[in-house]
Amino acid sequence: MNHLVELHCSDIIINKQPMNQEKAEDYADLMVAPVPARFPPILVRLSPEGPVLVDGRHRLAAHKLLGRSTIKARVTL
């Protein structure tokens, strides 16, 4: 299974992935530019506790910086 869904940012579990704040801020700037950059969906895997982030730490952080409550994600098992 690998399908695209819209997830609440606050529901995504982040497992100690390093995050560069400057990079997240740059992504946020690009997301709201006059011609917004297009980023791929983040990647999460399902666990009993909820969706766990596999790839996309900076994209998720940028969404949170912008006050967005949801993000597109590819879900794998």
Image (tube, rainbow, N blue to C red):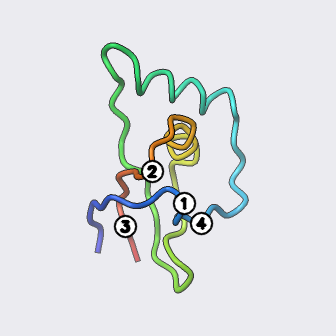
Cα–Cα span, label 4 and label 3: 13 Å
- Image mark for residue 55: none
Q: Residue at x 37, y 57 (%)?
A: 73
Relative to 21, does residue 40 appear above or below in the rendering?
below
Q: Nearer the viewer, mark 3 or mark 1?
A: 1
Please report contact status of discs 2 and 1: CB closer than 8 Å, yes or no.
yes
Quarter of the rendering occupied by the N terminus: bottom left
Residue at 40%, 50% in the rendered image: 71
Q: CA distance from mark 3 to mark 1?
A: 16 Å
The residue that disc 4 covers is 13
The answer for how far apart the CA atoms under marks 2 and 1 are is 7 Å
Per the image, the residue denoted by label 3 is 75
Local packing at callout 3 (Cα closer than 10 Å; few below 14, some 14-19, many 20+) is many
Of circles 4 and 1, the one toward us is 1
Please give the label number shown on residue 10: 1
Q: Is residue 33 above or below residue 21?
A: above
Task: Report x, y in % for residue 42.
Answer: 43, 52
As measured in the structure, the alpha-carbon distance from the residue carrying label 4 to the one carrying label 2 is 14 Å
- The answer to the question of whether label 2 and label 3 lie on touching residues, with beta carbons closer than 8 A, is no
Residue 38 vertical placement versus 75 (above, below): above
Which quarter of the figure has residue 25? top right
Q: Which residue is mark 2?
A: 69
Q: Is residue 54 left or right of residue 30?
A: right
User: Disc 4 or 3, which lies upstream in sequence?
Assistant: 4
Identify residue type, mark 3: Val
Give the x, y percent position of residue 39: 37, 36
Describe the element under mark 1 as helix, strand or loop.
helix
